[in-house]
Image (spheres, rainbow, N blue to C red):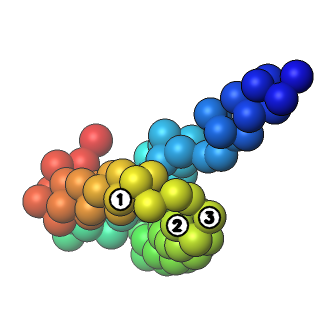
């Protein structure tokens, strides 16, 4: 019984960076709306994307506060990759 409890608490009981992949994808989408000056997005769409980007940043910051150190590093790396990709104009 004690082994089962330890297994649940010690393994898989917490969140991982992978649990936030959907949020990272949303972040990429929001960044990409404003990343390109050639985008066909309207001013309203750009404003909404910027607001969503800020909202996601708050959610990701909250996630970073609760993740273990290794997972924080992985989530930060995912965020950095998305920012670099959007900055380079490599948007879907």
Q: Quadrant of the C terminus?
A: top left
Can residue 59 be seen in this snapshot?
Answer: no
Residue 19 as seen in the image, left or right of residue 35: right
Q: Please name the residue shown 61% across and 46% down the image.
A: 15
Q: CA distance from mark 3 to mark 2?
A: 6 Å
Residue 19 as seen in the image, left or right of residue 78: right
Residue 46, by quadrant, is bottom left
Q: Nearer the viewer, residue 53 or 58?
A: 58
Few, some or many C-alpha atoms within 10 Å of disc 3 (few <14, some 14-19, many ≥20)? few
Q: Nearer the viewer, residue 90 or 5?
A: 5
Q: Quadrant of the N terminus?
A: top right
Residue 30 numbered tag: none
Q: Are marks 3 and 2 in contact (CB under 8 Å)?
A: yes
Mark 2: secondary structure: helix
Q: Earlier in the sequence, mark 2 or mark 1?
A: 2
Judge whether 8 appears above or below 73 on screen: above
The residue that label 1 is drawn on is 73
Q: CA distance from mark 2 to mark 1?
A: 9 Å
Residue 83, by quadrant, is bottom left
The residue that label 3 is drawn on is 66
Q: Nearer the viewer, residue 48 or 85?
A: 85
Q: Nearer the viewer, residue 41 or 77?
A: 77
Residue 77 pos. (x, y %): 29, 56
Residue 23 pos. (x, y %): 53, 51
Mark 3: secondary structure: helix
């Amino acid at each position: 019984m004690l082994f089962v409890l330890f297994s649940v608490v010690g393994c898989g009981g917490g969140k991982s960076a992978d649990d936030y992949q959907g949020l990272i994808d949303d972040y990429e989408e929001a960044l990409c709306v404003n990343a390109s000056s050639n985008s066909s997005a309207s001013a309203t769409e750009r404003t909404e994307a910027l607001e969503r980007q800020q909202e996601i940043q708050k959610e990701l910051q909250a996630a970073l506060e609760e993740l273990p150190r290794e997972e924080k590093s992985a989530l930060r790396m995912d965020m950095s990759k998305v920012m670099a990709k959007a900055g380079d104009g490599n948007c879907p």
